[in-house]
Every structure is written in structure tokens, then in C-alpha cells.
Image (cartoon, rainbow, N blue to C red):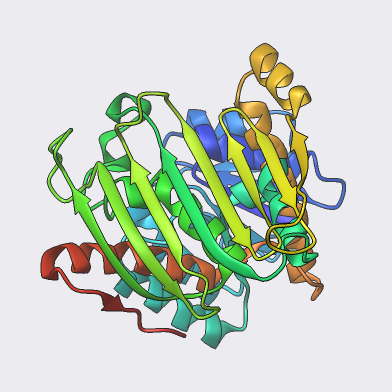
Amino acid sequence: MRLAVVGAGVIGQMRARSVALHPGAEVVAISDPNVEAARVAATGTRARVEADHRAFLSDENVDAVIVSTPVQLHEAIILEALAAGKHVLCEKPLSNSPESCRRILAAATKSGKHVAVGFNHRFYPAFHFMKQAIDAGRIGRLDEVRTYGGHDGLHNFRADWMYKRPHSGGGAMMDVGIHMTDLARWMAGDVTEAYGIASENVWHVEGSEDRALAVLKTASGAPIQYGASWNEWKGYKAWIEAYGDRGMIRAQYGPMFNLLIEQEKPGAPRKKTYKPYLDVALREKLKGWETTTLLSFQAELAEFLKKLAGERSLAADVWDGVQAVEVADAVYQSTRSGQAVRLQGR
């Protein structure tokens, strides 16, 4: 499979490397207005380097495109790629507004091409183990999901487009929180209704919340307690808990671990399993967090290629991308109205 990468920033460079490391894939082109950054991303490959992605979209040697640009550029590039007959893997969030996401969904449906969204946290070992445990029935019937994602503020961003509306589409919920929205939906199913409050009391960036709390209703009946923050004193934290009638499971990153509690029935003796992922902690201490991200990108790429081959895939699809943005928007609406907001649905 021959892939082109659009956008050669820090994440784009890791995306290009994940392709280069896959035995069944090849990086054939990389574009970025900063041509030198594109050249760096192309190191060790035979990829052509361009300042403008349009230079290679019509190239028959390109099967699929990875979009790793600022979010406000996603829609135009995805639509151009689909029109050129290319499959797409796009960084999260899919776009910066529900309307834009819906246009992408319509174009993907019409084209018959796959659009996957880069929710790479699905491929972090702790979150993947949690999904497997739930699907295997190890905690029984799912009753409730709780999730939270946060970090300690604006100094974590490399550019202001990453946190300022309208480019970003919003604040904490469109940043670290969007991973948690996807993970919670992955565990509990589509969100049908949202009630919540978003605030800008810490960093005072208009339109970009630094705190959000919400209760999400799902089609499965399992409610989701949701939180996202840019005021987390512990630094980066991402965790999710699921409760069933025969146990619970927690998955966390920062540090990575799982706690699984199982019982035959409510009130019965409990069996606890703790997975600390010491190998991840040691690797990150010696080589940095980027190593975990790169491994997740490699796993996500493998699943994306499965999707293109018509096989069952764990990669997030275009609908997952649409719903994650629409959940955030529903919380914004709920904040303004003080009422629960029903989501549009498929």
C-alpha cells in the first residue's frame, strides 16, 4: 500500500515513520509548506517531497493519504483526496465543527472510499486490554462508564491554532478530551444525548473551554460520566473506568496501568488483577513518550490497512470522528441553554 503524508510537523513525521516501518506499506510522497520539514519526514525513504499536496493527489502511485495538518485544513484536504479517489487517515479531531464533519461524512459515503480518524489511544495497551475485557464479558453487563482526560495548560501546545477557536473548534474537549469521548463511545456505544457545562475560568481563551463536565446518554443504556480539563495539577492524565454487574475495569495512561475486578455475581468474592506495564514506563523514561505514540501509530496503521483490505478493523471510522466532535458541540449547546441536547444520530 502506497501512502502520502500531508503535513510534516512532529506528528506528521511520526506518521511517516510508522508507514516506513510497516512491511506492507511505503511512503511515496510527503508535503508541507515548510519543505525542509517535509525533507526531514522523508529521511530514510524514497518519498517525493512537495510544498503542496495537490502536486501528488492525482498520482496513481498514491493509494491513500494521511492528513496531519492543523485541524482547520482537514476538511478541504480530505475532500480533495476523496475526489481524487484516495482513502484517508486523518488526525483527530476530524474537523473543527459538526457541519464540516457532516460534509466529510457525506463525501466519504458518496465516494465509497474509507476515511479513518486517528484515535490512536485505542491502541495503547491499557485501553486495548479494557476493550477486550468488556467484549469478553469479564465484568458482565455494562452499567456505567466514567472517563477523564486532562493536562496542566496552554504551555503544552506548540502553536496557538491548537487551542484557539475558530481554528481548533474548541478547548479541552477538542484536545485531550476528544480521545476520551472516542474511548467511552468505543466501550459503551453511540451517544444520543448530552448534558454538561463547559467553562473558561482558568486560561480565559474565548470559545475554548479549560474545563468541561458532562453526562452522556448512550444507545446501549450505559451512561457516561465525562470530564476534560486544561487545569490538571498532576500533568497529563487519561483514564476510563467501566462498571458492570460482575465487576469493573480501569485503564489509565500517565502512568499506564489496568485494574480489573471480577466477581461471579454482585456481593460475591472479588478477584483483582493489576497490570502495571513497567516496560512502557521504563521505555518512556529512557526514550520519551513519543515511543508509545509511535507504537500506537504503527498499530493503527495496520488496522487501517485491514480496513482497506475489507477486513474487520479496530481503526476509528468517519462516523466515530463525526460523533466525537458532535458530542463536544452538544456540551457547548447545553452550557448555553442549561438543557440536555439530543444528538442528530447517523
Q: Residue at x 48, y 34 (%)?
A: 237
Q: Nearer the viewer, residue 128 or 17?
A: 128
Q: Is residue 58 visible?
A: no
x and y percentages locating residue 335 in the rendered image = 17, 62
Q: Nearer the viewer, residue 184 or 117?
A: 184
| Quadrant of the snapshot with the N terminus | bottom right
Q: Is residue 171 left or right of residue 267?
A: left
x and y percentages locating residue 187 in the rendered image = 61, 63
Q: Is residue 311 visible?
A: yes
Q: Is residue 312 left or right of residue 331?
A: right
Residue 158's image quarter? top left
Q: How many numbered discs, if any?
A: 0
Q: Residue at x 66, y 66 (%)?
A: 245
Q: Is residue 95 left or right of residue 49?
A: left
Q: Quick check: 266 above or below 92?
A: below
x and y percentages locating residue 86 in the rendered image = 61, 69
Q: Residue at x 31, y 32 (%)?
A: 159
Q: Residue at x 31, y 36 (%)?
A: 230
Residue 332's image quarter? bottom left
Q: Nearer the viewer, residue 82 or 207?
A: 207
Q: Quick check: 339 above or below 22?
A: below
Q: Nearer the viewer, residue 257 or 200?
A: 257
Q: Quick check: 328 above or below 160?
A: below
Extreme residue toward the top, this view: 286
